[in-house]
Amino acid sequence: MNVEMDSSKFEIHSSKLYLVPTPIGNLGDMTYRAVEVLKSVDVILAEDTRTSRKLLQHYGIETPLESYHMFNEHGRVEALVERLMAGTTMAVVTDAGTPGISDPGFLLTREALKNGVEVECLPGATAMIPAVASSGLPCDRFVFEGFLPHKKGRHTAIGRIATEERTSILYESPYRLVKLLEELSEACGRERQVAVCRELSKLHEEVFRGTLAEAITHFNQKEVKGEIVVVLSGATE
């Protein structure tokens, strides 16, 4: 595929919302344009200001930070959209990865667009793409499930995944990883192929590839830490 590269000078636009991906572990994965956007906007909305402040300090970014997370986004969204419409330029960042992908960002994006505010998402880091690309499982067609519900709807979701013919990508915490693998094994069969990706881009990155039964044994024998992406092969006819 031929791609025409644009090397024009970066320009910020008033009354605009930028969704800015941040590294999932390695600070070197921050893009030049992401740094320029964060330096140029009026305010940065951060999932955790303590985490984001470390990133901003690393890159010499002095833009004011405001807290914007899953517990306050519903209460703040109307006022934020009003500020955008009045000319304020904002960027949304999360602790890691692309805003809106299993993280805050969608609600503000939807309401901004409803009110005629331009929204731009920069390309950048996300855990699911390197996970599925390195899994060794088919990645031409896949479905992203994110975090499964803990209780209501979980059994239904796992049943749907068990019959899905495309590769499935799930996020999980290290504390519930083995439980998820056991539930998938019961629904999909012990021999279904899986890749469990842990701490991607970080010093202790690990990608385990094998059957669900092998994955259960492997992770039962160690203390699991870090961010987890589970890539499950699709069902066969």
Image (spheres, rainbow, N blue to C red):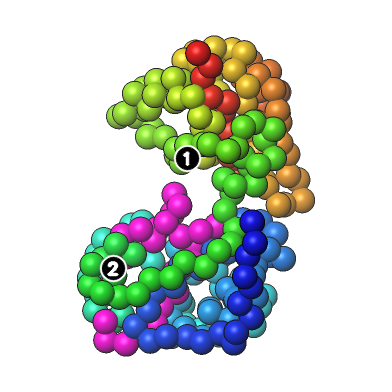
Q: In this view, does 158 lie above or below 46?
A: above
- Residue 86 in magenta? yes
Residue 113 is marked as 2
Magenta segment boundaries in residue numbering: 85-108
Question: Which amino acid, mark 1?
Answer: Phe
- Picture coordinates of residue 196, whole percent (x, y): 64, 33
Rendered image quadrant of residue 190? top right
The numbered dot on residue 76 is: none
What type is the residue that disc 2 sits on?
A: Leu
Residue at x 59% of width, y 87% of height: 9
Q: Distance between the residues labelled 2 and 1?
A: 24 Å
Q: Mark 1 points at which residue?
A: 144
Q: Where is residue 213 in the image (x, y as percent from the top left)?
A: 63, 15
Quarter of the image for residue 153 reads: top left
- Secondary structure beneath dot 1 equals strand
Crowd band around label 1 with a 10 angstrom C-alpha radius: few (<14), some (14–19), many (20+):
some
